[in-house]
Image (spheres, rainbow, N blue to C red):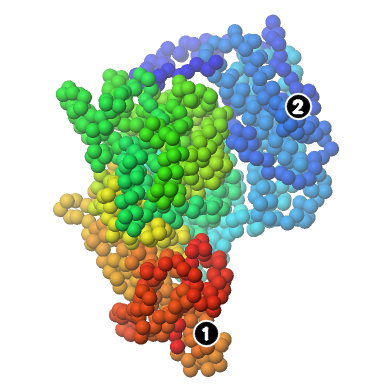
Amino acid sequence: MLLRRPPLPPPTLLHPPPLLLLLLFLPIIIVLNLLPPLRQVSTSAPSSPPRRPAASAARTTVAFAATPRSVRVGRHFRHRCLGRPPRAEAGSAPDDSVAENIRDDIIGSRRGQRTAGRQIAEGWHNFFREHSDRRTTTANEEQHRGLDSRIVCALDGISDLYDEINIAIGTPEMEKMFRKSEITPTNELVDWTFRLERDVRDIARDAKFLLKEYLRTTVLGELDDRTAMVAMKEKDKLEFLAGKVKGMQRVLRHYRMGHVKRFHPRSDESAYAINFQNKELKVAVGDSTSRSILDALEQPGLFVEFADQHNIVFGVDATKISKRGKSQLSLNLSPFQTERWMACYRQKLWWMTTTVGGATDRIPRETQFLLGKFTTQSKGKDEDGYILLLPLVDQVFRTSIYSNQQRKLQLRLESGDPLLLASQIPSSLYVAAGKDPYKLVARGVKFVSNYLGTFECRDRKSAPPNIDLFGWCTWDAFYSKVNRLGIGSGLDAFSNEMTPVKFLILDDGWQNAQNDEKWRIPQEADVREEEDVSEMVNGGVVSAETWGDKSGSQSSVLAKLVTWFYEKRVNRARFKSLSVRLWRWLAQGVMREKLISYFAEATDWMKRLVDIKANRKFNPLGEFAKDLKEQHGLDYIYCWHALLGYWLGVDPTAKGMKQFMPRIIYPYSSGLIPNILWVEPSLAWSPPTFVGVGMVSRKKADEFYEDLHSYLSICGVNGVKVDVQAAATTLGAKHGGGASLTRKMVHSMENSVRNNLNNSIIGCMAHPTENIYSFRSTPVARTSDDFYPNDQHSHQQHITTNAFNSLFLGEIVTPDWDCFHTKHPFNELHATARAVGGCPIYTSDRVGNSDYDLLRKLVLPDGRVYRAQLPGRPTRDSLFENVMGDAKTVLKVWNKNLVNGVVGAFNVQGWSWDRDLHGFRNNFSPDIPAPTLKTSIKASDVEDLKSPTGRFALYSHKFQRLHIASAGEEEGMELELAPTEADAVLVAPVFSFAKELQEQNFQWHRTEDILFAPLGNLQMLNGGGAISGVSKAYQNGEKIAYISIIGRQFLSFWCTKPPRIVRFQGYERSEENPDYNGVKLSFECMPVETGKNDYICRIDLSSFARTAVGSSNLRVQISEHKRRNSSSGRHDALLDVVQVCWS
């Protein structure tokens, strides 16, 4: 049985000095080197491990090879270890005895028999137990246990893969079809062969030396003659297998490389050719010009794993860097030769933020996305080019980027498990280039999705319907003090003001969680019970000073001194600084009990889940959910839970958790110093480090999530917000590594939610690439750190982080920009950001403390919102600029609606995150505050927005100004924004009747043309979202525009001549009769820069109830219009059509 780790890892400062260790062990090392090597023949031959029949030899050889010291963990482990389904479907196996026996064995296991791999693993484990006297330490026992699990993974994985290869391409007929390209190269088939080729290459590369590695290991000590002979025979069979897979590899390579141009995702005209020759990475622009991006790459461990004209994947051969395998290693590359770059890097364990820089600036640690900009010559003209670098996550190792003191780019690779040592890591870094940054990122992320096969892109997922409805989150409103009565009161307050909530996120506070028994406190001892929610800091936490005051005078003085020292000397210090080392020593020593007491009494971070069912406040949960939907009009209810159950996982001693076989696991306790500790040193003294995390067994993960989500489904809950996901990345030591463990837990959770809750997930605290590249079905995820209502320095960074992170994360999920408060000093800044972000819109207002006038600019009376169609991303002219500290640049965020576009302009100059200080820094002094800025909004700011006339109407919501511009116009609408001010500018294409007149009237050149631009509901921040379709016709001398709208509120449009008649729901309205049956039609003229008598027409439809269409002729026209525009959006079932007629 595995021994549980000690409660606490020894602090770093208490480790003996290295010189003392060397002096102690030097005599032992000398004596061991003088001894002769162990012979492979012993006087008393032990019983050999059990064997399979010769026909299944291939599986046995992998058992010999898969030792803890096997420094390579190939991708062929993915099938069983990671739960990947087999991909081959057609064909038949060749007449080969080994293949037939393997296939028969697999078929037998699928009929319910125990897999042969597990039988062999159990046999080896029994063999270890029989010879337990050979063990000298408990560490060997852990190694043997680790060997068992690796044997199971290796045997099952390689047998599935080998069977897959033979079934798919093993027959001569199939091989001929591949060679002659007679098989249609669909994206799915080419993608499958691409992945399979990598698997085959891995096995072929490993097969010859895996057994050799086993024979050199000292796990078993001595081997008798019989065992050695068996091993040598199996080695021959393994080499035979290597030859087979090499032949198949050649067939696959011939087939795939012949159709590389058809490989998904296909490159477009914006892609640049990229190549790596003579240790230099170059981007080819045009016919002859090339630009060097990385040169003089002298690093011998870097090799090209895959390359075509537009994509390169680099791998790392660790054996050329270090003779001894390592679980952590860094590679020095050359400087990143671009004029500007933009990086998304981890600011905390959980979250990623952004920064920009130039050629001389250092790229931060834990960079997970790097986009560079360079200028080159193309056909005699300057042209902006872009290069994308994506650090990848292999099946075991993750990669990140940063630059050292010499500004050289470095790759940092980590497995998270000291037993998983690097030999060859094929998937480490992806590189591509192009002239369109948005298409480049989309193409690159899709390529990586196909290449890794562990996640899917956003365009392959279905977004849950609730993201188009207004929501309310209970977190900032109540924190964990949430209760039934408060939720009901809050929902009533929103409904009474005509901004009804349609989906609710029941955040932390509903689950049955407790502290460990030693640290369990009665409710009256919880210092948060007497605190007002508005006074709590950063997530419902009581400050250390407040906690000290309630604990007594001595504790108060101590708390103030400790807080002062921590804030001034520790919190903003580097990881290996003296102050941090001193704090770690104190935290693990004399201050340990006090720190744990603070976490237990003032936070929820020490609690573990003790039962699947809700706590007493919300039990029975089903009745509560039913009441919310029936009495308060809710359509969707989401419940919060952590990926591992709760903040510290599950309680292994709880009766309701024992069935999942949980145990306590400690992060960072294996002697590893992961890169993230340099970014967030406070992780070294967090609650998981003190008392560990209770994690369910990997074998029971599926059962755990199935029980949790089926319970929620039965109770009427519609979805989940899965939080604290990055915690799994820190728990991989001796559990398969952080990447493997995280992928297993995320995929198990996703499968359960897909089966029980219709795939309704919001991912949260999940910004490590181990999480991001595991989002196989997660449709929505947070793109920034929390909205902190009491931290006045965090809001500029919050908006900026969401916009820039959406450039990367928006290709994988629909971005969630988090909740916000509508009654807040920065409320307009946040409301405008949500309007243009393409994200769900929900607040976390405290009950009755809302700005309803602001809410009505976001929410319709029926609870719907005008959500933009794409992730909101920075425009090209702000993509590489320091929008928070250069005193000149306005952050502009662009997005599209179904017909038009929108651009958000934000003056976020001021405070920003400082990665060295681990906190916010003012970029301006108190004497020189952040400046008021001017900017220009152009139609070209919205990428790929087309207009049939080449003209656009721009409308400013804040300043209520209209500007008519052409697509190529250099000057746009000028705006002036004070610090923290924002504006949303609608960009609408201008339509004309020229084509219809030409088709229907032979005297069209004598007929007056009309120009018009549907603007939408100008009372809303993203009013252009009200327009879902536009079509035109010329009938009986009338020019008719059919405008489909969402929500019967207001419709505004610009035109060059007032319309004669407006028809809606069978009624006609004219300028002469503007008010009829409560429907009002009014015109108003607004001066524009053109100086012409242009008009903005506004139609009031708010008094219309949803009734049947009055005119049969109009009903036919509306049906025809809906049919023609059925693909224009997701609201077709709720559309109304307005007819605007000109004579």
Residue 663 lies, in percent from the top left, at 48, 23
Q: Residue at x 71, y 11 (%)?
A: 47
The reply to whether residue 382 is visible in this rendering is no
Give the amino acid type for the residue marked by disc 1 in the picture: Tyr
**Label 1: few (<14), some (14–19) or many (≥20) C-alpha neighbours in 10 Å:** many
Q: Which mark is residue 57?
A: 2
Viewer-closest of 821 and 747: 821
In the displayed image of the protein, which residue is found farthest to the top? Answer: 43
Callout 2 secondary element: helix
Pointer 1 residue: 1034
Callout 1 secondary element: strand
Viewer-closest of 652 and 80: 652
Quadrant placement of the C terminus: bottom left
Residue 694 lies, in percent from the top left, at 45, 26
Quadrant placement of the N terminus: top right
Q: Quadrant of residue 1011?
A: bottom left
Residue 1063 lies, in percent from the top left, at 45, 78
Q: Is residue 679 above or below residue 230?
A: below
Query: Position of 864 compared to 318: left or right?
Result: left
Q: How many marks?
A: 2
Q: Residue at x 56, y 33 (%)?
A: 702
Q: Is residue 808 above or below residue 688?
A: below
